Image (spheres, helix red, strand yellow):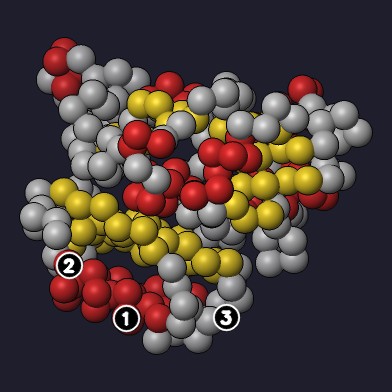
Amino acid sequence: MKTDAYEIVAFYKFVKIDDCETFAPALKAQMIELDVMGTILLASEGINGTIGGKPESIKQIIAFMRDHEGLEDLPYKSSYAPGHVFNRAKVKIKPSLINIGEDDKADPNKAVGEYVKPKDWNALISDPEVVLIDTRNDYEYHAGTFEGAVDPQITRFRELPEFVKKHYDPKVHKKVAMFCTGGIRCERSTAWMLEQGFEHVYHLEGGILKYLEEVPQEQSMWKGDCYVFDERVGVNHELAPSDNAKFCPGCGHALTTKLRCAPEYIAGERCSFCP
């Protein structure tokens, strides 16, 4: 039983949503009423968000979303903190949930890579024929990653296609495994990989967060902390706020005492290095 007072949930689902203009204000009103903070993105292709609040409030907001057509089975992953890790409630309507560039045409509703459950992930990435690609940004990779993972050295997700085209050939690299924090980036990236002709493409079901939740630490192939985009900055293998992760969630720069005292610094949002 978790003793921390606040539950943080991450969720996404690619599904057709036709009423974003009316769903968004209703969803934000529920968040405000329940004292739930964080960000939810809506697009005609689905929903994506990370929010936090009291467990009972989270239960109610999840139920509210699941009442919407197409979201009846909306999955989510939970972690916990002593208090709010976000400072506002936001619901945004976007053209797409996650943009991979390349005209952003890869459609996860048509085809995605093969899902691999956390319990089966170690066996897959231990296969010497598998190329393991971390689809996250460079500062996320440096906070923690899986053993043997390739760092694409990107600063934003839409740079990933260029990296793949430069380093990998679908005729040579027959097995590719990809992972990200919660799973949504891999929905788009594996869909794109299949479009490029890669034959066997896999991704970690539920992302790193689900792996840390289900795989015992003594069996884990994860090293370091998992970077998260809130005031915790990083979580450890127990999904508790990490004492090691002291990086700006806006740009990933290490937060020194001097930077924390700068006028541009806003806890959990930005520092003077942010663009």
First-in-chain label (2 vs 1): 2
Give the structural element (helix, strand or loop) at label 2. Answer: helix
55 on left or right of 148: left
Give the structural element (helix, strand or loop) at label 3. Answer: loop
| Contact between labelled residues 1 and 2, with CB atoms less than 8 Å apart | no
Instruction: Residue 179: tell me if it is visible.
Output: no
First-in-chain label (1 vs 3): 3
Q: Answer with the quarter of the image where residue 156 lies.
A: top right
Mark 1 is on which residue type? Ala
Residue at the spot x=70%, y=27% of the render? 128
Dot 3 alpha-carbon crowd within 10 angstroms: few under 14, some 14 to 19, many 20 or more: few
Mark 3 is on which residue type? Asp
Q: Nearer the viewer, mark 1 or mark 3?
A: 1
Residue at the spot x=67%, y=47% of the render? 202
**On the image, numbered disc 3 is attached to which residue?**
18
Separation of disc 3 and disc 2 at Cα? 29 Å
Position of the N terminus, as image quadrant, is bottom left
Give the structural element (helix, strand or loop) at label 1. Answer: helix
Q: Answer with the quarter of the image where residue 219 lies.
A: top left
**On the image, numbered disc 2 is attached to which residue?**
55
| Contact between labelled residues 3 and 1, with CB atoms less than 8 Å apart | no
261 on left or right of 210: left
Q: Is residue 248 above or below residue 206?
A: above
Q: Which mark is residue 232?
A: none
Separation of disc 2 and disc 1 at Cα? 12 Å
Residue at the spot x=75%, y=30% of the render? 129
Separation of disc 1 and disc 3 at Cα? 19 Å
- Between residues 172 and 234, which one lies in front from this camera angle? 172
**On the image, numbered disc 1 is attached to which residue?**
63
201 on left or right of 262: right
- Where is residue 176? Give x, y as percent: 72, 38
- Where is residue 238? Give x, y as percent: 26, 42
